[in-house]
Image (tube, rainbow, N blue to C red):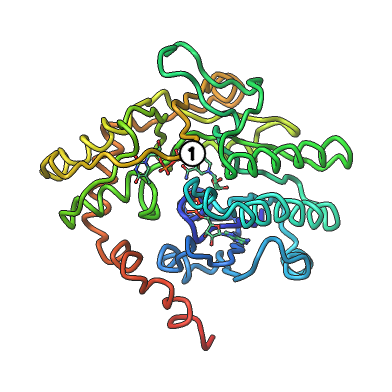
Amino acid sequence: MKLLVTGGAGFIGGNFIYYILNRHPEDKVVCLDALTYAGNMETLASAMGNSHFTFVKGDISERETVFDLFQKEKPDIVINFAAESHVDRSIVDPGLFLHTNILGTGVLMDACRKYGVKRYHQVSTDEVYGDLPLDQPDLFFTENTPLHTSSPYSASKASADLLVLAYHRTFGLPVSISRCSNNYGPYHFPEKLIPLMIANALNDKPLPVYGKGENVRDWLYVEDHCAAIDLIVRKGREGEIYNIGGHNERTNLQVVKAILSELNKPESLIRFVTDRPGHDRRYAIDPTKIHNQLGWKPVTRFEDGIKRTVKWYLENRPWWEHIVNGEYQNYYARMYGNR
Ligand code: NAD
Ligand code: TYD
């Protein structure tokens, strides 16, 4: 089986590539990634020597690049992680999100139609459902919850989901979609809550908490997400949407305090700052469908996952320090420029 993984130099795609190379050593993996600010070849350094792994630098929205790659590699399964993924950046520059997240998805699916794939899988997000109130803890997102987006990021992801379902209905493309809650774990870019707080705390810098820190996210350890996607692309039904989440809800303040306690750093580092415009209050996934149909359930409790994550950032300081000082962006040219 040959898998094309887009966005594999990013956080979840990178973890997914290692998951596949370890769990399915018979498979071949091709990664297509444009290496935007979020793409980091240092994340894929350990995969580069594997004869079952190929890296291609390219943009999913560039038709010629994508079609040439499909012609050459003829992937069986395409898993699209490539996206602009940060809500705060989408508030500053929405256009880029529409281009990559919607048009890029369309180009990939056109190539899937032309060259024929067994499955096109779209990695989506629970943010397409909007948010839930803080005072009704019994409410959860199911696959039938209406789309109701808040940010340009979530609107672009919801648009892409609709396009994927349209390609299934109109062209019969064999698709699936997963909508996952917030991930955390190794290789998470330090602009997102958990890695940013770890990096700042280690540097004794203030930890900027938006609003009162009351917003709730449903945290999933990234390896559990990878396991779910692996199951969906091999055993999940065509045309179906699967919610992925682990009933690990925490307020942002609880998360930040857990990190400080793990690092033995004082809570006086916390700074409450101006809230994010349109800030979603609570995300919470009902994962009953994927559990009943495919037997998936998360194995990592938040208490264990956050310990493992903090330990990873302590043991891999160069990885995130190169991001903070910008050095990671020269890595590709340095390592692969003359190859
Ligand atoms: P990320 O920002 O860490 O990585 C995105 C990757 O995509 C980067 O390597 C980047 O270089 C690449 N990329 C961006 N634009 C591209 C383009 N035009 N062509 C090719 N590559 C391009 O993102 P992530 O957190 O790993 O998220 C991966 C996917 O999972 C996204 O689709 C995101 O919407 C979704 N998701 C993320 C979370 C989360 O908590 N991080 C939760 C649910 C869903
Ligand atoms: P983030 O990691 O950006 O993920 P998302 O917005 O996709 O859920 O943010 C997680 C939560 O943490 C969200 O409620 C916003 C909040 N947050 C802060 O309080 N401070 C920060 O510096 C960041 C980046 C996020």
Instruction: Name the image quarter holding the C terminus.
Output: bottom right
User: Quadrant of residue 144 in the image?
Assistant: top right
Q: Is mark 1 within 8 Å of ligand 1?
A: yes
Q: Residues within 10 Å of mark 1 (few under 14, many from 20)?
A: many
Residue farthest to the front, as pictured: 274
Identity, as a three-letter code, of the amino acid under mark 1:
His
Say whether residue 301 is left or right of residue 6: left
Q: What is the x, y in percent for residue 151?
A: 56, 40
Q: What is the x, y in percent for residue 23?
A: 49, 48
Ligand 2 is found in the corner quadrant, namely top left
Say whether residue 196 is left or right of residue 172: left
Q: How many discs appear?
A: 1
Q: Dot 1: what SS?
A: helix
Between 200 and 322, the one nearer to me in the picture: 200
Residue farthest to the right, as pictured: 170
Please tell me which residue is depicted at 50% across the width and 61% down the height of the picture.
9
Q: What is the x, y in percent for residue 94?
A: 60, 51
Say if 297 sits above or below 256 in the image: above
Please tell me which residue is depicted at 55% across the width and 21% down the height of the picture.
141
Residue at the disc numbered 1: 225
Say whether residue 56 is left or right of residue 187: right
Q: What is the x, y in percent for residue 269?
A: 16, 45
Say if 318 sits above or below 167 in the image: below
Please tell me which residue is depicted at 50% across the width and 21% down the height of the picture.
132
Say if 91 sits above or below 47 in the image: above
Say whether residue 207 is left or right of residue 263: right
Please tell me which residue is depicted at 82% across the width and 53% down the height of the picture.
116
